[in-house]
Image: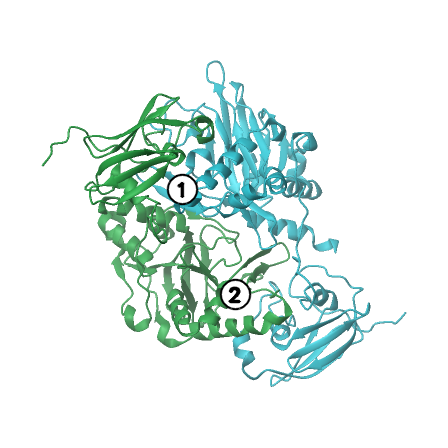
Chain colours: A green, B cyan
Amino acid sequence: MITKTLELPRTPDFNTYPSNQLITQAVLLTNGVEVTWNDGFKSRFHTLWLRDNCASEHSIKLSTREPIFEIDEVAKNLSIESVSVDDSGSLVIHWQPEDYISRYHPGWLRCYAYDIEGELTPVFKFERKLWDRESLGEVPTFDGPTVLTNPEESAAWIRSIYTTGLGLLRNLPPEQQSSADAAALIGSLRNSSFGVFFHVRADINRPVADSVAYTNIALPLHTDLATRELQPGVQMLFCLTNDAEGGENVFVDAFRVAEDLRQSEPEIFRNLCETIWEWKYSTKEEDYRVEGPIIVLDRYNQIREVRSITYQRGTLQVPYNQVDACYKALLTWYRRVKESRYQVRFKLQPGDLIAFDNRRILHARTHFNLSGGSRYLIGCYVDTDDLMSKMRVLSRGQS
Amino acid sequence: MITKTLELPRTPDFNTYPSNQLITQAVLLTNGVEVTWNDGFKSRFHTLWLRDNCASEHSIKLSTREPIFEIDEVAKNLSIESVSVDDSGSLVIHWQPEDYISRYHPGWLRCYAYDIEGELTPVFKFERKLWDRESLGEVPTFDGPTVLTNPEESAAWIRSIYTTGLGLLRNLPPEQQSSADAAALIGSLRNSSFGVFFHVRADINRPVADSVAYTNIALPLHTDLATRELQPGVQMLFCLTNDAEGGENVFVDAFRVAEDLRQSEPEIFRNLCETIWEWKYSTKEEDYRVEGPIIVLDRYNQIREVRSITYQRGTLQVPYNQVDACYKALLTWYRRVKESRYQVRFKLQPGDLIAFDNRRILHARTHFNLSGGSRYLIGCYVDTDDLMSKMRVLSRGQS
């Protein structure tokens, strides 16, 4: 074993990268460098790409790993004077005319290597566990006060919201602050025209119930704020009272439904990904509209989100000869998500907070009876940006 | 002139539609209806589409015009018993098995007619006025207290933010509430990990300036929160003090730059629309990342937004043979937006609030000198959803 006198260099972020993937050789090319790793794998990197991703103190701010230089300004007559591999197995580059040395962490470089056969894969990838009623079994359930105070338990709850799309907290004090505290474990509260906290209760004194949510009637399966460009990523519904008859919550993993359609009815699936529907919410003072498909794929053809709300779907605008196929796909979708084999259904108790991925899990509620009881939920949202930030930070030590 | 005994029917939203486009004939087809308007134009509508867009009291809630039925449930054995045109020039349909009558506003129906040659056009479209320094001339400027109290002036300010991407309010009381009041004219305040209000001042007592914004150094042209899936639509910077030397604000209409590139360097333009860059912001506790191109087009090939921030751009991940072209496009973009012919530049005075479209207008600030003066801006955001809702409501009377 060789004793190393040099530490591996900093990376352009705070992640952990493999420390056993070391570089054994580096060769200067006309427009970059070719490196060979200790397992024999080779890959080329462009001059500009290397300079752009320099993580030395000369190039980035330590607290955020943000560049403190502008690549278009250093690029004008940039060149590599020499390349080498140092004692730590890192790539070393001597730049001109800056007369400046960069070192590259070999594990980071290998992770971001783009000179490969076939398709690039995402660097950050977390597995989801799609479910139907039978495969989910119990909704993942956690003790609320423990989650609020114990970092490992809060991490487990956060991972559950990403992985299964759901995480139920129990035994929280039945006051609004509990939902604020739970949301703060993930990120910032998201605002909307319905307020930072929205109060889901039937209120016969409300002059106009400007959303059907604020009545006692059943709500069909839907995503919230589908009429906004960005649907909220995490929705939290916190139960203060629920002794009215009825008013169960229903949840469906729409990614499971969509993947089943991708297998069994690929034309329907494709139509759901491609047809641009309008989603709208309007009153005398407001007119929110957004266009988007029911299923959104990412650039790796993975399902990124669904958008689906029966009573806020607007007017279809596609060429005449596409209309029949679009309605066929829409009706297939609506009927599929209603199949009971996909649904979990339960009644929230006071102190229960259910957090779910609003862009994946459709939710509904059954009708409830106002005589002889009440039902009062407090809702709030946190964006997917915040959830993913937490997921990345939680994964930093796991490479 | 014929005296009409019937009013035109309700539409599925609160907009105004032409009342001079009337229907003269309606014919039942196998899978829908063909209508003829009073100017001779004909178009066909599908059975399901018509039922889906029924705006009668039987089908929608009056306060929000939301459907109160589910199209997949009525669709099972839906049929049209008869069609006709009534005295108001509206289409009348008698449905079975519901045994129910729908009436359709002819101006609305014409506006949404999809049985046309060529491409469909958006129903809601507002003109933008792209600019460079010379064509903009003065930044559109308004008296703040008047805008806050006079609906016509607030409408003019809101239209200016959409149309030119900028609107400056003057003479506001120099306290945080002023920016809250201005934001409330458009919509809800958007939250982020930097807070609902962010305080842009150099603070030598801050242990770690977790963004370069909170120092006195120059900031290159950028969009804010480019590391989030949805960049804020409207940014407001409100000046409390600004007597330090330097610290001018710079604004560039990036849509103008992009359209110029579309004309002069179409390959560069295309690369900027297609290359997926990573945008990231990370600290020891946070790791925000998003992937997206520098120029985003909508489905009509119009520019929808730009995303551009030098110091929060992450690592490019594209196949090896695309790297050179991507950097060429990136450097062209960075160098173009810096050209002084595109820049307006001015110094905010206490009581000034500049509102701008953060997804269109790049902003920068010059270095400022902390000795012998101070500079303190309060920033906040409102989403494009809210701006567009206001634009649509303001246009309702104008058809």
The local crowd at label 2, few if under 14, some if 14 to 19, many if 20 or more residues have their Cα within 10 Å, is some
Q: Which residue: 48% across, 67% down?
A: A270
Residue A396 visible in the current orientation: yes
SS category of the residue bearing label 2: helix
The amino acid pointed to by label 2 is Val
Q: Does residue A145 appear left or right of residue A383 in this picture? A: left
Q: Give the numbered dot on residue B316.
A: 1
Question: Label 2: chain?
Answer: A
Q: Give the numbered dot on residue A74.
A: none
Q: Give the numbered dot on residue A212.
A: 2
State the quadrant of the N terminus of chain A: top left
* Extreme residue in the top direction: B372
Q: Which residue: 51% across, 41% down?
A: B381
Residue B237 picture location, percent across and down: 54, 33
Residues B228 and B378: in front is B228
Q: Are marks 1 and 2 on the same chain?
A: no
Residue A15 visible in the current orientation: no
Q: Considering only vertical position in the picture, is A260 above or below A72?
A: below
Q: Does residue B320 appear left or right of residue B263 in this picture? A: left
Question: Label 1: chain?
Answer: B
Between the C-alphas of marks 1 and 2, the distance is: 45 Å
Q: Considering only vertical position in the picture, is B194 above or below B93?
A: above
